[in-house]
């Protein structure tokens, strides 16, 4: 889990990317109404209110990881899976004004702490909510994933085609690697081919089909945000992302 962690010199740029992505999300959220918040999101069983509450609580959970890295005192990302889910359920029905205040404040808390993290603490190992050990240098990417992907989940006009190319390229590379870790090494695999960037990669040792499409379409399919209908090739069943 540590080999793809960025160097410290990349962190300031990553934080700028998170800030810009957050501004885009806030602009979309601010255009919603209270009635919009109770409408379904793209995530099964979640309203738009659930999505916004989750993004806010995610920021606080990543504050916990940065505090762990900074102080050396173990601070779990979430106290428990039950409390994580309960906080999202409790936050989902709030009116838009409260959602926006929480979204801004939680994002600002996380970003402010990240910007003053001492350089030598970024290499500290912490654990994500799945229990995986990661260096703190990966936390900004974790936040960017949440903001960009859940922005799409709001179903308000922001789609994978709107993702910045650098984000799409990294997401595609990592989602291919994620599927490669889960596939049966002796079973049939597949190749992905991005028609717009030239990126190609193979999942498994015996590819039987090539899945082609734009980098954004491929990444969206690999993380379960698309059924692959905008891709070409014999679309295989995928393991759940992450």
Image: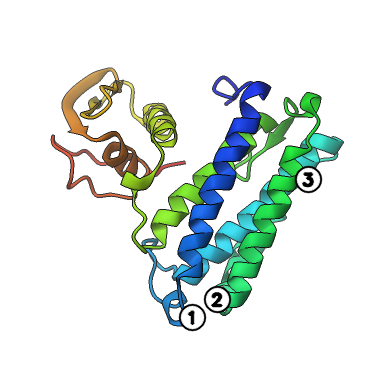
**Quarter assignment of residue 230:** top left
* Quarter residue 217 falls in: top left
Q: Earlier in the sequence, mark 3 or mark 2?
A: 3
> Can you tell which mark lies on residue 96?
2
Residue 116 seen in the figure = yes
Q: Which residue is mark 1?
A: 34
Could you tell me how far apart the alpha carbons at marks 1 and 3 are, in whole angstroms? 35 Å
**Mark whose residue sits in front, 3 or 2:** 2
C-alpha distance separating marks 3 and 2 = 30 Å
> How crowded is the residue under tag 1: few (<14 C-alpha within 10 Å), some, or many (20+)?
some
Residue 218 in the image, given as x and y percentages of width and height: 28, 37
- x, y (%) of residue 80? 68, 56
Location of the N terminus by quadrant is top right
Residue ID at (54%, 46%): 20
Identify whether 10 is placed above or below 218: above
- 2 and 1 marks in contact (CB < 8 Å): yes
In this picture, is 184 found above or below 139?
above
């Amino acid at each position: 889990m540590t080999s793809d962690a960025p160097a410290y010199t990349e962190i300031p740029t990553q934080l700028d990317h998170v800030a810009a992505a957050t501004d885009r999300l806030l602009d979309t959220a601010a255009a919603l109404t209270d009635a919009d918040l109770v409408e379904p999101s793209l995530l099964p069983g979640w309203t738009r209110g659930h999505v916004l509450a989750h993004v806010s609580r995610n920021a606080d959970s990543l504050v916990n990881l940065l505090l762990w890295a900074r102080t050396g005192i173990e601070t779990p990302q979430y106290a428990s899976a039950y409390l994580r889910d309960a906080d999202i359920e409790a936050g989902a029905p709030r009116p838009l004004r409260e959602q926006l205040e929480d979204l801004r404040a939680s994002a600002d808390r996380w970003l402010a702490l990240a910007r003053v993290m001492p350089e030598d603490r970024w290499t500290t190992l912490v654990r994500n909510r799945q229990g995986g050990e990661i260096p703190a240098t990966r936390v900004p990417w974790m936040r960017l994933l949440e903001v960009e992907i859940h922005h799409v989940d709001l179903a308000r006009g922001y789609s994978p085609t709107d993702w910045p190319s650098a984000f799409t390229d990294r997401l595609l590379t990592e989602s291919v690697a994620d599927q490669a870790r889960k596939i049966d090494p002796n079973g049939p695999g597949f190749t992905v081919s991005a028609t717009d960037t030239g990126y190609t990669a193979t999942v498994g040792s015996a590819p039987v089909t090539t899945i082609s499409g734009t980098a954004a379409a491929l990444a969206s399919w690999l993380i379960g945000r698309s059924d692959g209908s905008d891709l070409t090739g014999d679309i295989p069943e995928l393991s759940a992302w992450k």
